[in-house]
Image (cartoon, rainbow, N blue to C red):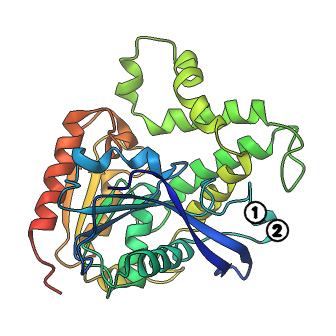
Amino acid sequence: MSVQPHHHQLGDWPLACGHTIPDARISYLQIGDANPDGSNLILVPSSYGARVEDLAWLANAVFDPDRWCIVIAGQFGNGASSSPSHGAMGLAEQGCVVQHRDNVAAQKRLLQQRFGAERLAMVYGWSMGAQQAYQWAVDEPGWTERICCVCGTARTSPHNRLFLLSLRQALTADRHWNGSGFNAPPEQGLRTYALIYASWAASQPFFRHLNEAVEEHVESHWLPHYQRHDPRDLIAMLDTWLAHDVARGGDLQAALGRIRARTAVVAGSHDLYFPPDDLRADADAIAGASFHVIPSELGHRAGNPHSSPIEQGQLRRITAELLAHPNSS
């Protein structure tokens, strides 16, 4: 069983925006062995800021690696797959915006060439990973038997867009921003960014019950996670999130209505990014989709409970139920 991250070379990779990533690569982590026919493959696209190893906790906690082959794939911009920090990839300022259909196409190439796959048992994703799961179901219906979309929507909402723009502004307002990158580490910009991110990612009850000052909490628990990234990569992933729309500006209800994958949509009760009402609306547009709410004060992070067994158990139950039933499409 492989537990080390790898890179799969894609060659020169054209993006939907018209730019090309030269010598592109996608990072991935395989946990568990694939069946000869690939019928046990579960794809896990990465969330914002996540490296593939950050999501390895899903093995055993949510999915049995003795039964399933879990392939965690890093999205473009995460610093391990092709990103502005390497590989000559630009930002929106240069007209370069990665869309999730670019990530899906790269993941499909990985699955074909590395695993000989033609179909997936499930695409499971949290946050930006959920966005990619929706994109898979819309773009590749023949591949996608099931999707489990946790704390993410099929289109970035106007309110969510405000949050993302505030993060981008926090970084680009730093005195070291030069219009296309940074002349020095944007220390003040990153601190402002971390304060904004933390205030939305966890819930009001979570912060109410903290045993330390919120400033200290952000400094010790949030800021280091983002300081490990090149700030240009953080911006590139924000731009992908901002551009997310499986309907490409068209009729979202119609696009979701064409999904034939067996679908579970999972909301966090206190998620400020993706409120339950927004997720329920997506689920209602998909034939046969089940809708679940995880009661949790973790807020958005209820969908990524790497250290919380209660929420892990709820995700394990939901995914087991989804996998137990064949897709009826």
Whether residue 188 sits left or right of residue 53 in the image: it is right
At x 20% / y 55%, what residue is drawn? 292
Circles 2, 1 touching at the beta carbon (< 8 Å): yes
Q: Which of these two is toward me, 281 or 233?
A: 233
Residue 294 appears in the figure: no
Residue identified by numbered label 1: 91
Where, quadrant-wise, is the N terminus in this rendering? bottom left
Q: Could you tell me how far apart the alpha carbons at marks 2 and 1 are, in whole angstroms?
A: 5 Å
* Residue at figure coordinates x 42%, y 23% from the top left: 207
Percent position (x, y) of residue 26? 56, 66
Residue 172: horizontal and vertical position, in percent?
79, 46
Q: How many dots with numbers?
A: 2
Give the residue number, with chain letter if any, for mark 2.
Answer: 94
Give the farthest residue toward the front.
1
Q: Residues within 10 Å of mark 1 (few under 14, many from 20)?
A: many
Residue 63: which disc? none
Q: Residue at x 78, y 72 (%)?
A: 95
151 to 312, vertically: above or below: below
**Tag 1: amino acid:** Leu
| Placement of 280 over or under 186, stated as above or below | below
Secondary structure at badge 2 equals helix
Residue 266 image offset from top left, x and y in percent:
26, 55
Closest to the observer: 109 or 186?
Answer: 109
Q: Is residue 260 above or below residue 319?
A: below
At 40% from the left and 52% from the top, the residue drawn is 274
Q: Secondary structure at mark 1?
A: loop
